[in-house]
Amino acid sequence: MGRLALFIVFFAGISCAIFITFVSRFVGYSESVWKTKLKQKAFAAVPDDDQIRVSEDIHLEVALRTASDVNVADTARNSAAETEAEGSLHAALDMKKQGKVDKALKLFEHAYMLAPLHPDVLNHYGEFLEDTQKNVIMADQLYFQALTYSPGNSRALVNRQRTAHVVERLDHAMLQRIDQKRDAVSAIPDAAPGLRRAKKEAYFLHIHHTVGIEGNTMTLSQTRSILETRMAVGGKSVVEHNEILGLDAAMKYINSTLINRLGMITIKDILEIHRRVLGYVDPIEGGSFRRTQVFVGGHVPPPPVEIYPLMEEFIVWLNSEQSARMHPVRYAALAHYKLVAIHPFSDGNGRTSRLLMNAILMQAGYPPVIILKKHRSHYYKHLEMANKGDVRPFVRFIAECTERTLDYFLLATTEFPALDTNGDSSRTIFVHESDAQIHNSEGKTLDPDDMEASSCINNSYCDDFDGA
């Protein structure tokens, strides 16, 4: 009996040791993944309560098509249009040989519009952009499209091999530049008055442009009034008011729960975001997966029975070590695209996807990206291109929006020497022009005297603040 008890104790000890080892390895893995994600100080996007009152969206339905949706009708080219495109292509090549670049460019664009799937048009147009416009990124994109529609095209293969590494280096340089600006913003003390004002203005801009992308007609000043006073705006629909309030509630939820949490993002988190996004507009559908089949333009999203398995796969990818090792901007952009492609909700898919993207960016120390409503067509176009197989243009688009947002914060928090206002010109301090220059993402000098409003950094941010 004593030997049996000793054996049981010995066996139990071994079992406990194995279990503890397994649990410690699992916890260590989870911590390593999330420490990688949370190296940077999280960005708190929501203004303080003393700056804005807080309290507790339906139109963005991106017409995405999966590869299986591409049928014969999509790939069949109209013979008449193709014949005209080939004629324009030959004329463009002749103009190129004669050195008439402007005329050649118009002819190439005409041929591309007529036959966007023609490998010869894509190849020659890309070579023209590469040689005369030095636009390697667009040329590489055209070569990629040529290979998509004609995988065995030898000319496209040679061209793509030449440009792929160049484009990769350019993308890497852009991400490094964005990281440097992110670090500069992170170094600004949280209590700095300029940063506090910038956060407040950026918060209004983010909500205004996010609902504006989907057709909300509220102006920036009206959006600000609703968020600060909770008073209705005359002549505007209840739905438009509720879209703004829902996005505000979702941003508050993300700011208070997700960005500082050390742990995995779950399906429940995404449902909670959606519940707030749609809570004021459609409380019944908010926070739940769709139960009916929906149709978005010519695209038929997955049926309801496939949504939960697809979301489980998405969550596995979202929390994987592979994803954690990606650059945060690329990781956030891919998460946005994948969730939109699944289309798990009856409404509010776009807003929820953009909020998830911004939650990931804020965890990595970036401010929430502002996608301007005037860039709506570019936003849709890049999503559609990602759906066709090339996700890089969409990642670049998100990277450009991220850099533009960082430029806004850097300009808004830059302190310039004060000028004497006593009227004595002899005591006026003159600042050398080179000492007061700030450059935007395109390398152009930004002059603070040319700003129309405190929240403008360039013409993009002065885009229709009155909501026209």
Image (spheres, rainbow, N blue to C red):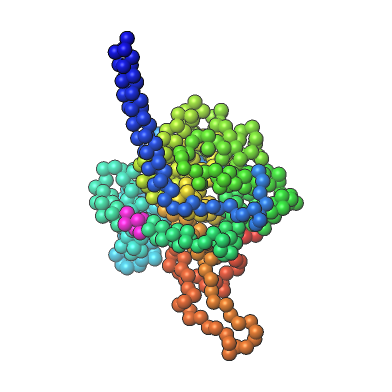
Is residue 29 toward the left or the right of residue 238 in the image?
A: left
List x then y, in percent, for residue 331: 41, 46
Q: Residue furthest right?
A: 234
Which is nearer the eye, 18 or 251?
18
Q: Nearer the viewer, residue 57 or 14?
A: 14
Image quarter (top left, top right, bottom left or bottom right) of the C terminus: bottom right
The stretch of residues the image draws in magenta is 168-173
Taking the magenta stretch, the answer to whether it contains residue 427 is no
Q: Residue extending furthest top?
A: 1
Q: Main secondary structure of the magenta part?
A: helix
Q: Residue furthest front?
A: 2
Q: In the image shown, does 158 or 113 lie closer to the viewer?
A: 158
Q: Does any portion of residue 410 appear in the rendered image?
A: yes
Please tell me which residue is depicted at 53% across the width and 74% down the height of the picture.
416
Q: Within the magenta stretch, is there residue 170?
A: yes
Residue at horizontal 35%, vertical 63%? 133
Is 284 on the left-hand or right-hand side of 357?
Answer: right
Task: Estimate the x, y position of residue 138 in percent, counting from the top left.
Answer: 37, 56
Q: Quadrant of the N terminus?
A: top left
Could you say where residue 417 lies in the image, as x and y percent from the top left?
Answer: 54, 77
Whether residue 90 can be seen here: no
Asked where in the image residue 88 lies, by quadrant, the reply is bottom left
Q: Residue furthest bottom?
A: 426
Above-or-below relation of 434 to 308: below
